[in-house]
Image (cartoon, helix red, strand yellow):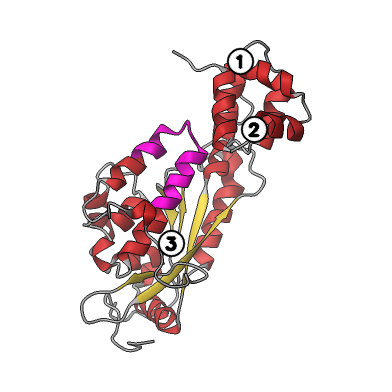
Amino acid sequence: MPVGFGAMLKSWRTSRRYSQLDLAMEAEVSQRHLSFLESGRAQPSREMVLKLSEVLRIPLRERNDLLLATGFAPLYEERTLDSADMVAVRQALEVTLRHHEPYPALAVDRQWNVVLQNAAMDRLLGLVGSPASVWQRVDPSGRRNLMRLTLHPRGMQPLVRNWLQTATVLLARLQREVDANPSDAQLRALLTDLCALPGIPLGWRHATWDRTPPPVLSLELGTSGTASLRLFSMVCTFGTAMDVTADEMRMELFFPSDEFTAAFLREANTAAPPHSRPGRKTRKPSTRPSSRGEGK
């Protein structure tokens, strides 16, 4: 049975932790009218749907759902990155990923599926095997999910030295995204699947730091007898997206947390084959962190 506008609006208001009075004041509408909208005793205008959606920071995909629930046509298109109208968007993503070399970077959709990535990301995956085989064993669906890659026992998990902190932070982040997008069944299913993976701590929701936490969490990677590679990430989004695909797109840019990691990534880039590193001489690639810099 289709969910009506009133129930959808109430769900979004609750997930955003707004009272009816708070939302009414920000949307400049009476609380009585808002109550009537949620109960189905009144129907909103198209402008009211869009105004409430803006105040509640509802993603564009779900704004279309709200419009459809009230009998209006969807406003926001969902184009593929290969469409003519999205050329500038795709070029912006590709330029950013390329310019981030020699550091890893990816573009992911709302469910954390990788859409684009740079060559440095493949080199990082080389620490656990050939990229194609790694993706196949952690995500045979073909979606290449970044969360699965990081947390799966046949993915990056065996290399993650600060495992408890990493699992806690990533799953808590995903839980917040699920709570913020109550209608996204795929995102909720992803969280459920990840929590069932081997090695996920049962008390991850309640884990705490035993000391003052750092400004950002570093992902510490390493194999037996090697120094750790320490990386932190920054997420970038389109600030004025008017297309569903662009609105849901995020870039995950990884940066070195120390000079040893920066040097390792630069060396890996220099050693990369010509097809992944145009215009530079070929050197034998290194797939293991050097022991130099241990203890930094």
Badge 1 marks a residue whose secondary structure is helix
Q: Quadrant of the C terminus?
A: bottom left
* Main secondary-structure element of the magenta-colored stretch: helix
Task: Name the residue tied to disc 2.
Answer: 19
Q: Residue at x 36, y 43 (%)?
A: 191
Residue 67, placed above or below residue 166: above
Residue ranking furthest to the right: 28
Residue 246 lies in the magenta-colored region: no
Residue 295 in which image quadrant: bottom left
Residue 31 position within the rendered picture, expressed as x and y whole percent measured from the top left? 73, 24
Q: Which mark is residue 39?
A: 1
Classify residue 15 as left or right of residue 170: right
Reply above or below: 150 against 36: below
35 vs 80, nearest the viewer: 35
The residue positioned 70% from the left and 30% from the top of the image is: 21
The magenta span reads: 171-189
Which callout, 1 or 2, points to the residue nearer the camera? Answer: 2
Query: On the picture, is 12 further left or further right than 25?
Result: left
Q: Position of residue 121 (x, y in %)?
A: 38, 64
Q: Mark 3 near mark 2, Cβ–Cβ under 8 Å?
A: no
| Residue 176 counted in the magenta span | yes
Q: Quadrant of the N terminus?
A: top left
Question: Residue 172 in the image: x percent, y percent?
Answer: 42, 51
Q: Is residue 25 above or below residue 48?
A: below
Looking at the rendered structure, the kind of residue marked 2 is Ser
| C-alpha distance separating marks 1 and 3 | 49 Å
Q: Position of residue 173 (x, y in %)?
A: 45, 51
Circle 1: residue type: Ser
User: Can residue 32 be seen at all in this image of the molecule?
Assistant: yes
Which is nearer the N-term, disc 1 or disc 2? 2
In the rendered structure, find residue 118 and report the number of the disc placed on it.
3
